[in-house]
Amino acid sequence: MAVSEEECSSIKSAPSSSSSSSSRYYLSKSVLRPSAVLQVLYAHLRSPSSNDVVFGKETSIELVVIDEDGNVQTVCDQPVFGIIKDLAVLPWNDKFRARRPQTQGKDLLVALSDSGKLSLLTFCIEMNRFFPITHVQLSNPGNIRDLPGRMLAVDSSGCFIAVSAYEDRLALFSLSTSMIGSDIIDERIIYPPESEGSASTSRTMQKSSISGTIWSMCFISLDSRQPSKEHNPVLAIILNKRGALLNELLLLEWNVKAHTISVISQYVEAGPLAHNVVEVPNSPGLAFLFRAGDVLLMDFRDPHNPLCVSRTCLNILSNAVEEQTYVDDSCKLQDFDDEGFSVVACALLQLSDYDPMCIDRDNGGTNSGPKYICSWSWEPENYEVPRMIFSVDTGEFFMIEVFLDSDGPKFSLSECLYKGVPCKELLWVKGGYLASIVEMGDSMVLKLKDGRLFFTNLIQNIAPIFDVASGDYHEEKNDQMYACCGVTPEGSLRIIRSGINVEKLHRTPSTYEGVAGTWTVRMKISDSFHSFLVLSFLGETRILSVGLSFTDVTDSVGFEPNVCTLACGLVSDGLLVQIYQSTVKLCLPTKDGHSEGIPLSSPISTSWSPENLNISLGAVGHNFIVVSTSNPCFLFILGVRMLSAYQYEIYEMQHLELQNELSCISIPRPKYGKKQSNSSISENNSSIASWPTEPSHSSSINVVDTALSSINLVNSMTMAFNMRKNLPSVLQLIAIRRIGITPVFLVPLDDTLDADIIALSDRPWLLHSARHSISYTSISFQPSSHVTPVCSIDCPKGILFVAENSLHLVEMVYSKRLNMKKINLMGTPRKVLYHKESRMLLVMRTELSIGACLSDICCVDPLSGSVISSFRLELGETATSMELIRFGSEQVLVVGTSLYSGPPVIPSGEAESAKGRLLVLCIDHVQNSDSGSMTFCSKAGSSSQKTSPFNEIVGHVPEQLSSSSLGSSPDDNSSDGIKLDENEIWQFRLVSAATWPGIVHAICPYLDRYFLASAGNAFYVCGFPNDTPQKVRKYAVARTRFAIRSLTTYFSRIAVGDNRDGILFFSYHEEARKLEQLCGDRSIRLVADCILMDDNTAIVSDRKGGIAVLCSDHLEASSNASPECNLKLSCAYFMAEVAMSIQKGSYSYRLPADDVLSGGIGPKTNVDSPQNTIIVSTLLGSIMIFIPLSREEYELLEAVQARLAVHHLTAPILGNDHNEFRSRENPVGAPKILDGDMLTQFLELTNMQQNNILSSEPPDVCSSNQLLFAVNGCLPRRVLSMNRLMVTVVE
């Protein structure tokens, strides 16, 4: 989504390296990957039988599955370190022969990217990621207009691939049946050839007949009975010739033997504009031609004589049952720097003119033009009657069935199946589900049932993100992020939290102080649900019944109540075991404690104690018990035998003397009949050892002897201990992971070998042990001391956390890919502020879909999603900026507007001659005696203007929150017991308004008594005289050459960003009331946003997808430097995404004990300042974080990144040169910000793979083992912890 403008790519001066004094070192990391889906595909990628869905998201590829309930579950979300232009599926052909059995029968993914290469990818289950099979060079990196590399088409047999340029040229490839490495491409040809394409004679141009923009293309299957490789492929293309009023349909044939391509026929018909050609599957020679207003079924069985055999008009389609609002579908283009951009753009954008970056666009209303098909999908694996579902630009869905009758091929059109918003892509998958992808809003999963489509689930999309803010979450120590997302009618406010979402079911009072352990226990081994919750305190043990409420049943179970329980469990049906320091106790609960207990008045118990030894650890298995002692160290294995009715005995089966004290014992319960799987245990040093075990009816005992936050995956073909063998097996270390910044405590969610594990560290994490790695995801819950799974009838997947002396019963919600709450706003949210006094959100909306007003400022309650109050602007007026400004002890909201409906900036970058207003609003806290609607008035800025009354219903909830939202329940407007007082109202009151000579694009507080505001290419230092907001006074003014886009300050320093000159530093002299320019940017830069980190450091993002750190040390001493050209580029980074919002954040990752525990090995750093982090949000819906590094850390990680960027396991999968990609749009030799996404891959490798990468060229001074130890100590704290998204945005 980067906006490419040729005039912004030049550099004012030659590149120069930064001095050591101005050097800054940063590491970037995506904490929320892009959510905007541009391509969607259905294939068998993981295995021949898997039903996989691929989301192409421009800078990443996400592999998901749609389960039987219509939920979208992410399997893999992989950055590609490039920009995806197009994706397609290469289906497996039975004639193919794979080199590796793992790829036999699997489809391949074909990709085009800005690397200039055609890439074929396969999915590796073991590594859970895509890997390239081969790359074919098509052009130089970038976006070249007349060389192939924009659009893909794949033959249905999987034998041919076509690649088109933006215009004038295409390439065809045939695939080898060997499917081995680079030999997968058999033949290739480019049409027209270089000599013909460059010829200027009319005869040559007439011969090629391909001069123009290629809109669409597909292969035409002619004869299914003929082997695919033995016939000449035919390609159909839609061509828009320069100056032509109609598009042409051309058929091209590739004579493979003669190695020539020729145009064999042409079809042009007067009427609507043709925009897509689509092959009918399993119907040789048939294809649909989509035009604006109608659909044509084409017969290409004789490719030299194409015929239209059936057609229908789209403008007379049946009306939908339910009418909804809609927006025009927008066509997304890749950016390229070429003089022919305007020609191609005009051709491809005839069907759409929406620009999400233009804030002053008029609300277009309904579409008055002809209907056109904007997306479609064929029913998968239907070999008899081809069926297609398509969506038109009005949001209506229809179905087409193709059939043969006596007159030839025909098609029938259904009634309207569904009415929603227009979708960019459609995908029909197995099970009757349909993925409807919306470009600037949430997508949907629809279900085809009884001839209708029904809504099933959402596919969340928060793109584009225009602004973010943060605020505290009630009664928790974690902040959450508020984001302005989407455009009308799908514009919304998103409340984003990190990790897996949890639904909070129950919370007890804070009376559980000193909890030392928690367990859940069943009454019988075959029970599906838990019966008891055991809580161990420092000197007490309590047993509660399991359910949504907890009842104390300690006296009915028989456990010793006045001791600290070390372990407990079910040894056999009805027999519970308690292990504490001196004794192992066996208990039989009564019916008062459980319905299947013994029919006696009091429980029966028996015990066993070691002689003169204290028990330190214990675990309970099926029919046996294991305990260990310390000083001396022994391991006892105990059995249980029945003496008589209700009478049992605990006896010693065997014991083993140990050399070291044990830190953990775990006895997994195997699932019979399953293949070998992994189990895990934890050491005192917070590591996990995991190994597979063979199916057996005997249980294994896993032990570890005797610190931080590391995770080890260990492999062995035998058990660590077995009932028949006392000797430990030889374990092979597979992987080490470090997680969080505190020691890790592991709790399995089940007692089976393949159970997921919760790791309690600085916050809860969910771990999955895979074959070669450990995957992890943070859980959206506060730091907890203990956790245990709880399975009951009311809550089958419950989890009990102990936090802040309370018990929290929650349930993890897996149904959503993103953990967030959505508040519909019926407009496009442009900016959001968190008002601390009211705990409300102030949102600036444009393109409102309610009433005649286009824009307003509204107050939103983040708990209930209610619009509390609103201040609507005048007709034709649009809000462009706002900021909370303090003066004295008071606070007001200053709003900038535009009174101009055209573009705010002319092509040269200068400000358009337009006017705007500066409004000052007070936010008043009033008591509302009427729970109904309230009326507010926007007073005019002058006596000649009229007031604008409006009605806003207080407490209106635009969207009912789902159970996965942050509230307690869909019907409860409270969260964690906090309720909104319906009588408390915060409303806006206009106190002053003034017309300014330009659009007020930026407002910023300055010092503690002024604020800055821009109008066109001028900005002013303003204030409130006599500390009254009724009048705004301008104290000073300064002008730039081009329109100002951003204003930011750091104490007395002012940074101004404009449309061409980049960043300018200013200083204000209060006594002289004068603004002075101190320094300027060296580069021409189209500024998107900017923020000052200190007096001399600015972070700036541009609208071409880059971010830069600009520095100017010792400004006052730089008298010899030109003020227009003395900012130095400290470091830069090409994100390939436009960052519209940059925020400061606080981020800390070190502990005081770190240096002691590291033993002096590894880099030392001290960069934990309160505001040291940069948080950016992009138009693709991603959130990135940039954290500072010390020079030692930077050099260490830079060396690792250089190796990862070229290693075959971690190199960019689309063939990009990583260094070239991250250096784009920056001067040659400019220092780069490190790529955390590239470095994260290092943590996903095995120990052996890590060593192989670190020992590769170039050699280091230290050994690979030393480097591995240092990297594992530095990298996870910098990269892994950033996955949490738990950073505080500094307001």
Image (cartoon, grey):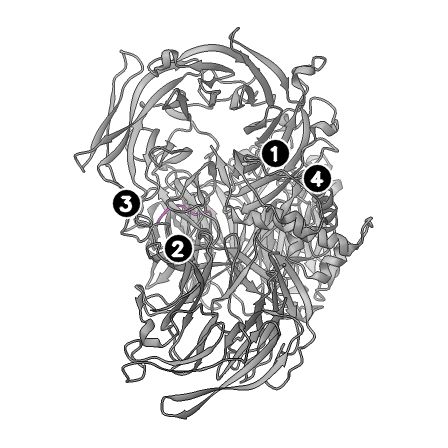
In the rendered structure, which disc, 4 or 1, sits on the residue that comes first in sequence? 4
Task: Judge whether residue 43 is colored magenta.
Answer: no
Mark 1 belongs to which amino acid?
Answer: Ile
Task: Judge whether residue 421 is colored magenta.
Answer: yes
Mark 4 belongs to which amino acid?
Answer: Thr
Above or below 1059: residue 70 = below
Instruction: Give the Cα distance between marks 3 and 1.
Output: 42 Å
Mark 3 belongs to which amino acid?
Answer: Lys
Residue 979 bears which disc, if any? 3
Q: Which residue is at 31% across, 22% downward?
A: 874
Number of numbered markers:
4
Tell me the residue that label 4 is attached to.
204
Instruction: Give the Cα distance between marks 4 and 3.
Output: 76 Å
Instruction: Give the Cα distance between marks 4 and 1.
Output: 46 Å
Tell me the residue that label 1 is attached to.
1107
Pick the front one: 225 or 488 = 488
Q: Which residue is at 63% across, 28% downward?
A: 6
Tell me the residue that label 2 is attached to.
805
Residue lying farthest to the top in this orientation: 1072
Residue 1223 bears which disc, if any? none
Q: Secondary structure at mark 1?
A: strand
In the rendered structure, which disc, 2 or 1, sits on the residue that comes first in sequence? 2
